[in-house]
């Protein structure tokens, strides 16, 4: 289930007038709670919790979405993940839009499995019409790309997993 499907589900639940909906699938659990129409308007917030220890192997993420004129909606998403402790996470140094290619007609900077060196350009992040090259601060092998091309990214959001060995 991707973010667009979750957003559609939120809008549907908000319009339906239901106070709570729970949805459980193989590896994801979603709970949507709506407040009363005259309730206090909460700000939008996203909370990322640190990786759980290897015994638990779970990541918990709590998101509250607030559309102007609609009730507050909470989603609790629980997804199981593999342990990534042996990998180095390359994070976004700025807020902007993540691009894997220098331009639409060019190939991507790096693919999963590519060996990178310190100083290699991994991606670009567009912020305020400026395209900023994001260079690697480590050498290693790209294990995973954590962000889709043309997606918005936040400061300190994980972008790549690198195996330093």
Image: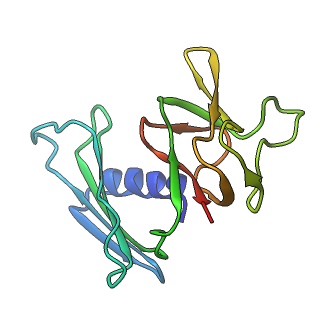
Near-viewer residue (97 or 70): 97
**Residue 152, above or below 111:** above
Taking the image as shown, residue 33 lies to the left or right of residue 132, namely left
Near-viewer residue (41 or 107): 107
Q: Position of residue 26 (x, y in %)?
A: 48, 83
Taking the image as shown, residue 125 lies to the left or right of residue 153, namely right
Taking the image as shown, residue 113 lies to the left or right of residue 107, namely left
Near-viewer residue (46 or 163): 163
Residue under the point 27% across and 33% down? 69
Residue under the point 43% across and 58% down? 9
**Residue 37, above or below 86:** above
Residue most toward the right?
105
Taking the image as shown, residue 29 lies to the left or right of residue 161, namely left
Q: Position of residue 93 (x, y in %)?
A: 48, 33
Q: Position of residue 53 (x, y in %)?
A: 32, 75
Residue under the point 58% across and 31% down? 97
Residue under the point 37% across and 80% down? 54
Q: Position of residue 143 (x, y in %)?
A: 65, 63
Q: Quadrant of the C terminus?
A: bottom right
**Residue 85, above or below 138:** below
């Amino acid at each position: 289930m991707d973010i667009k499907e979750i957003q559609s589900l939120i809008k549907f639940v908000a319009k339906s007038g239901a106070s709570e909906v729970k949805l459980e699938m193989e590896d994801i659990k979603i709970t949507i709670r709506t407040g009363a129409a005259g309730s206090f308007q909460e700000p939008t917030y996203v909370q990322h919790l640190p990786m759980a220890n290897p015994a638990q192997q779970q990541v918990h993420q709590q998101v509250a979405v607030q559309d102007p004129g609609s009730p507050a909606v909470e989603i609790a998403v629980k997804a199981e993940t593999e342990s990534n402790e042996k990998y180095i996470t390359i994070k976004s140094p700025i807020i902007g839009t993540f691009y894997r290619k220098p331009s639409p007609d060019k190939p991507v900077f790096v693919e999963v499995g590519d060996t990178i060196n310190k100083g290699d350009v991994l991606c670009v992040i567009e912020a305020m019409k400026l395209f900023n090259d994001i260079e690697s601060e480590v050498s290693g092998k790209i294990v995973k790309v954590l962000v889709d091309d043309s997606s918005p990214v936040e400061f300190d959001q994980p972008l790549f997993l690198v195996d330093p060995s």
